[in-house]
Amino acid sequence: MILGIGSILFSDDGFGIRVAQRLEKEYEFGDNVLVVDGGVLGINLLGVISKPKHLIVVDTMRNRGKPGDIYRIEGEQIPERIRAKNSLHQVDFLEALTLCQALDNVPKTVIIGVEPEDIQTLSLVMTPVVQSKVDEVIALVLAELDRLGAQYRKAVSSDVPGDPFQDHED
């Protein structure tokens, strides 16, 4: 599962959602890959994130870096980094991930984040520095799918014949 988190109403906070939207628009995925707009549902994502074996989360991530810095964290790094955040939906997401233990299915999770410039201004537009990182983060998400052996390909027009899910390097 690829899970975009954030609120498109607050400038850079919508980064994860915008990446998920682009992935859904520009790629087709095998039946075992699901792209989800998690919004700011936080703890309410428990039912969604407790199902997959592997979870790739895309979000903004405050890590005292420069706006636009990209981070990849996994495993035991996740609780420490997320606890330091000041966004309620990120804290709630950590709680939901922790509660997956009660359901005996904690997905192997990777979080790909970008350091935001502005997550407080009410705006549907991301800052230029964060917007410029969307393509790079999409490439990182696709690299995670490659690592997991998941199938995907660039979306093609429905009137173009072809073998679905042929090698994604085309």
Image (tube, rainbow, N blue to C red):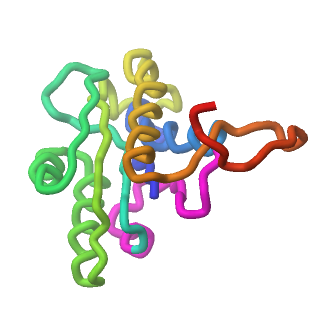
Q: Is residue 47 magenta?
A: yes
Q: Quadrant of the N terminus?
A: bottom left
Residue 137 point in image, percent of width and height: 41, 32
Q: Is residue 113 above or below residue 2?
A: above
Image quadrant containing the C terminus: top right
Left or right: residue 143 compared with residue 155:
left
Residue located at (17% from left, 55% from top):
75
Against 106, residue 25 (above or below) is: above
Q: Position of residue 101 (x, y in %)?
A: 22, 78
Residue 11 percent across, percent down from the top left: 43, 31
Q: Residue furthest top?
A: 128
Please tell me whether residue 51 belongs to the stretch shown in magenta. no
Q: Position of residue 142 (x, y in %)?
A: 46, 39
Residue at x 60% of width, y 56% of height: 30
Q: Can residue 126 be seen here? A: no
The answer to whether residue 82 is above or below residue 119 is: below
Which residue is outermost to the right? 159
Q: Is residue 133 left or right of residue 105?
A: right
Question: Would you identify the image quadrant in which residue 159 lies?
Answer: top right
- Residue toward you, 156 or 102: 156
**Residue 19 or residue 7, whichever sits in front:** 19
Q: At 22% across and 56% down in the image, what residue appears?
A: 91
Q: Which residues are magenta?
A: 28-50
Give the residue drawn at x 51%, y 56%.
36
Res. 5 visible in picture: yes
